């Protein structure tokens, strides 16, 4: 560019930007916009009331927001539709599924444009060379995909080169770091081990991880005590990135578990993101108010605590989680050995029956998947129903499924009132706690939780439009600007010039989830267009085949 031209353009940009930056940005850009989205009801993600406006996109950026923007090669008519920043799923289990189905259909069709993976203490590495080798073989056999990474940084680079539909950020999992350094046993780390674990967390964050996650109801992550968690979380101090926790307990010891999560933030000096807040079991439903008060008081006390929530009264986890954590110490084989040990049966059975009683009955537990096809008859069925049908004791049936391969469960344990209360609370952020699945192919098996297909549309349809639990602009903020701020995605989550062009256009009168507990493999309806990094991945509710998703790094440094 000639020097004079450069000066003229630089002066023009500076001059007009000072007059009306939002409206004129598109008009003064060196390039004409590639796409103009016309006459949508624009929710900018901040929680502000919507305005009718055009939005211009040039390359991978939003370059204009305002009335009657100049034309572009591609124009989309959004009359009657809402336009929001693409949704950011702050607690997602989309990790390896992207290697299987890069189109991420069940998430794209919810309007999700960024997945925050590495949840519940479980991330893609760090792995040893042996672990990498065994996973590599498994993936090559099962999906024909060749893995060549061993940690979160490598995973992000791998995803970046893969060509996927969604953006992906990832936390580093405290449980995975522990497993890597210490193995599966229930013991405290030696000082050297702790040092190595802290170094792994620090390295992951330097490589782009957007926080540290823990899963304290799982093994071996749950063998960590408060001191260990504070030490690991301290690797985040000064970055602004959060410690996100699936807490040690979500039912009878919920309040103590919330205190522990907050104390990690307090002692390490980092934000705390409580994962999928819930009060499980009718006898614990009263705890919703006290638990919110504990979080509010922590904030008043200087701890930056928030929580996420998914819009369902049932949770989903492994069937083995019906058993106390001591029973799962030492890995799968040790667990199965204990299940077969007659001397341990009274203690184990007592604990499981109490857990099931707290949920309601054996029919509060639905088998979502079984690892062995020989147990396919159990998929999608309630344990109580199944046991009486087969003339078997439900506890024996559960043990049989677990010893013959294991599987997943859906537990009906929460109250509708509490789900609504959490969603409406100013500190909540919406999540799915699910993965990108599909209605066809290898990701269409079993009877997974409907949240994998419906979480975000369910909030906008059921809780906003039908139950009027919170205003639409508030719900959108909890899916966009709030999670972006939380995990350091400074240029996502808002509609404004200069922000990344991740956008979703939906019909606020028709958006709805269609997935049910019996038939979860159904895409949501009412999502018209989804744009990721300036390219349409869904147009008129059809997959365009574009795969513009990138790996995103969590960073509190604002580069704009
Ligand atoms: Zn979890």
Image (cartoon, grey):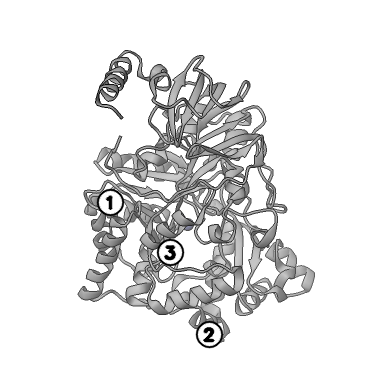
Residue receiving disc 1? 265
Q: 258 or 149: which is nearer to us?
A: 149
Q: CA distance from mark 1 to mark 2?
A: 37 Å
Distance between the alpha carbons at the discs numbered 2 and 3: 28 Å
| Local secondary structure at mark 2 | helix
The residues bearing labels 1 and 3 have C-alpha atoms spaced at a distance of 24 Å
Task: Name the residue located 32 percent from the left edge and 18 percent from the top edge.
Answer: 17
Which is nearer the N-term, disc 1 or disc 3? 3
Residue carrying label 2:
337
The residue where tag 3 is placed is 124
Give whichever of 99, 445 is nearer the camera. 99
Secondary structure found at label 3: loop
Q: Is residue 215 left or right of residue 42?
A: left
Left or right: 376 in relation to 364: right
Instruction: Report the quarter where the N terminus lies.
Output: top left
Q: Is residue 68 above or below residue 268?
A: above
């Amino acid at each position: 560019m000639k020097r004079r031209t450069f000066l003229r353009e630089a002066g023009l940009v500076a001059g007009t930007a000072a007059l009306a930056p939002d409206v004129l940005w598109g008009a003064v850009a060196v390039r004409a916009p590639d796409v103009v989205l016309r006459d949508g009801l624009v929710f900018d993600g901040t929680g502000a009331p919507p305005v009718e406006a055009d939005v211009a996109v040039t390359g991978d950026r939003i370059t204009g927001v305002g009335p009657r923007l100049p034309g572009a090669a591609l124009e989309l008519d959004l009359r009657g539709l809402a336009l929001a920043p693409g949704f950011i799923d702050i607690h997602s289990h989309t990790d390896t599924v992207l290697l299987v189905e890069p189109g991420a259909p069940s998430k794209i069709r919810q309007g999700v444009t960024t997945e925050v993976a590495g949840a519940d203490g479980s991330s893609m590495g760090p792995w040893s060379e042996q672990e990498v080798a065994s996973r590599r073989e498994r993936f090559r056999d099962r999906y024909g995909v060749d893995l060549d990474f061993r940690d979160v940084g490598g995973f992000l680079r791998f995803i970046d080169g893969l060509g996927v539909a969604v953006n992906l950020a990832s936390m580093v999992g405290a449980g995975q770091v522990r497993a890597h350094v210490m193995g599966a046993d229930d013991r405290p780390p030696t000082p050297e081990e702790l040092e190595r674990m802290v170094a792994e967390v620090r390295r992951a964050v330097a490589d782009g991880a957007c926080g540290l996650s823990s899963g304290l109801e799982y093994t071996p992550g749950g063998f960590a005590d408060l001191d260990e968690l504070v030490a690991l979380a301290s690797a985040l101090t000064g970055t602004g990135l959060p410690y996100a926790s699936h807490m040690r307990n979500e039912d009878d010891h919920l309040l103590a578990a919330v205190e522990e999560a907050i104390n990690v933030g307090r002692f390490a000096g980092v934000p705390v993101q409580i994962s999928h807040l819930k009060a499980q079991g009718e006898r614990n439903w009263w705890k919703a108010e006290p638990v919110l008060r504990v979080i509010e008081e922590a904030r008043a006390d200087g701890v930056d605590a928030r929580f996420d929530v998914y819009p369902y009264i049932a949770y989903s986890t492994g069937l083995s989680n019906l058993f106390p954590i001591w029973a799962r110490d030492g890995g799968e084989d040790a667990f199965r050995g204990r299940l077969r040990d007659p001397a341990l049966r009274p203690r184990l059975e007592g604990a499981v029956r109490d857990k099931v009683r707290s949920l309601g009955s054996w029919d509060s537990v639905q088998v979502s998947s079984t690892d062995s096809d020989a147990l396919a008859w159990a998929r999608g069925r309630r344990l109580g129903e199944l046991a009486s049908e087969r003339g078997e004791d439900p506890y024996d049936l559960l043990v049989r499924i677990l010893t013959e391969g294991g599987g997943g469960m859906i537990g009906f344990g929460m109250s509708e009132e509490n789900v609504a209360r959490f969603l409406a609370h100013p500190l909540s952020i919406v999540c799915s706690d699910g993965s990108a699945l599909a209605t066809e192919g290898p990701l269409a098996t079993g009877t997974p939780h409907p949240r994998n297909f419906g979480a975000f549309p369910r909030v906008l349809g059921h809780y906003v439009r039908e139950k009027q639990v919170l205003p639409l602009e508030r719900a959108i903020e909890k899916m966009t600007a709030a999670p972006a701020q939380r995990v350091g995605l400074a240029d996502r989550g808002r509609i404004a010039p200069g922000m990344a062009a991740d956008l979703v256009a939906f019909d606020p009168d028709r958006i709805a989830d269609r997935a049910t507990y019996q038939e979860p493999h159904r895409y949501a309806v009412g999502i018209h267009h989804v744009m990721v990094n300036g390219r349409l991945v869904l147009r008129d509710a059809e997959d365009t085949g574009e795969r513009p998703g990138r790996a995103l790094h969590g960073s509190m440094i604002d580069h704009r």
